[in-house]
Amino acid sequence: MAPYDDFAWFYDRYWNEEFHSLAFPILERIWLERLGPAGPSGPHILDVCCGTGYLAGLLAGQGYRVTGFDLSPRMVEFARRNVPEAAFHVADAARFQLPGPFDAAVSTFDSLNHILDRDDLEAAFRNIAASLRTGAPFAFDMLLEEAYQTHWGESFALVRGDHVLTITASGYDFRSRLGRCTITMFRLVEDAWRRADVTIQERCYTPAEIDRALDQAGFGEVCCYDAGDLGMAGDLGEGRTFFVAVKP
Ligand SMILES: C[S@@+](CC[C@H](N)C(=O)[O-])C[C@H]1O[C@@H](n2cnc3c(N)ncnc32)[C@H](O)[C@@H]1O
């Protein structure tokens, strides 16, 4: 099972709107406006680690053609239900091959920090580059060390009549550069409380490592933008950087 499978129901319900209401205007400014007009024969966008399809839905709503993929079959099930007009696949970013070429790619909400191995991150960038046409822009955001050293360690709880969720962060290990949090969830289904426990791990990469991996994968013209400077306020923007790279 993929780590997000058991988390998918909660993610779909609680984790999309707040982030994307702040991230989408940033993407429009730094990436989307580089694309041609949307439409049935307009740009085709690849959403890497698409989650439950919220971003794909925003893009499809503007008339773009969208294909997304995610490691978690359960997240993809939600995405297919949420955005029937887009295509979704179950695939690993470090190993995928999809028939392209796509006109742009995107990956949001620190999804690429979930790739724990530097070689796998480079492989993901290489696969994304291979799926793009020449000149296509790829936008993504990643968390840098400042984020893991601050709010990553915070705990969180949500209690509702028929569902409960707690997040216990085990903090950030600065030697391995791994952040880990444990999510415990209960849902009342057919008069019985069902429990699921999930551990999510993320790897902190330095800007130099990210730049090198992009370079090795063949991306150029790399620009980076601090999320806070672009208006992403609060914890969500802290230590988060948006990158745009171009397939030369
Ligand atoms: C924080 S969620 C973000 C989802 C979505 N991009 C969004 O903006 O809402 C991280 C997603 O990355 C996916 N993921 C993690 N590792 C992956 C991998 N190696 N390949 C594809 N998807 C992956 C997870 O299953 C999860 O859906």
Image (cartoon, rainbow, N blue to C red):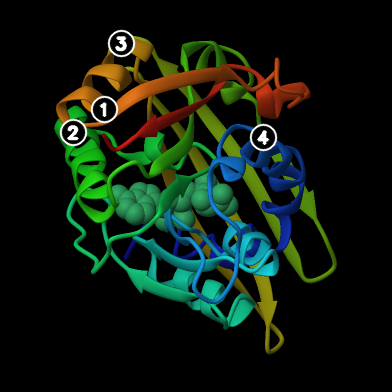
Q: Secondary structure at mark 4?
A: helix
Residue type beneath disc 1: Leu
Please rate how many residues cluster around mark 1, counting C-alpha atoms within 10 Å: few if below 14, some from 14 to 19, many from 20. many
Mark whose residue sits in front, 2 or 4: 4
Going from the N terminus, do you reach mark 4 or mark 1 first?
A: 4
Q: CA distance from mark 1 to mark 2?
A: 5 Å
Going from the N terminus, do you reach mark 2 or mark 3 first?
A: 3
Q: CA distance from mark 4 to mark 3?
A: 24 Å
Residues at circles 1 and 2 in contact by the CB criterion of under 8 Å: yes
- The residue carrying mark 4 is 29
Nearest the viewer among 63 and 182 is 63
Displayed quadrant of residue 18: top right
Going from the N terminus, do you reach mark 4 or mark 3 first?
A: 4
Q: CA distance from mark 2 to mark 3?
A: 14 Å
Q: Secondary structure at mark 2?
A: loop
- The residue carrying mark 3 is 208
Nearest the viewer among 92 and 25 is 25
Residue at position x 45%, y 30% in the image: 244
Q: Secondary structure at mark 3?
A: helix
In this picture, residue 86 sits left or right of residue 212:
right
Please rate how many residues cluster around mark 4, counting C-alpha atoms within 10 Å: few if below 14, some from 14 to 19, many from 20. few
Going from the N terminus, do you reach mark 2 or mark 4 first?
A: 4
Mark whose residue sits in front, 4 or 3: 4
Q: CA distance from mark 2 to mark 4?
A: 25 Å
- The residue carrying mark 2 is 217
Residue type beneath disc 2: Ala
Mark whose residue sits in front, 1 or 3: 1
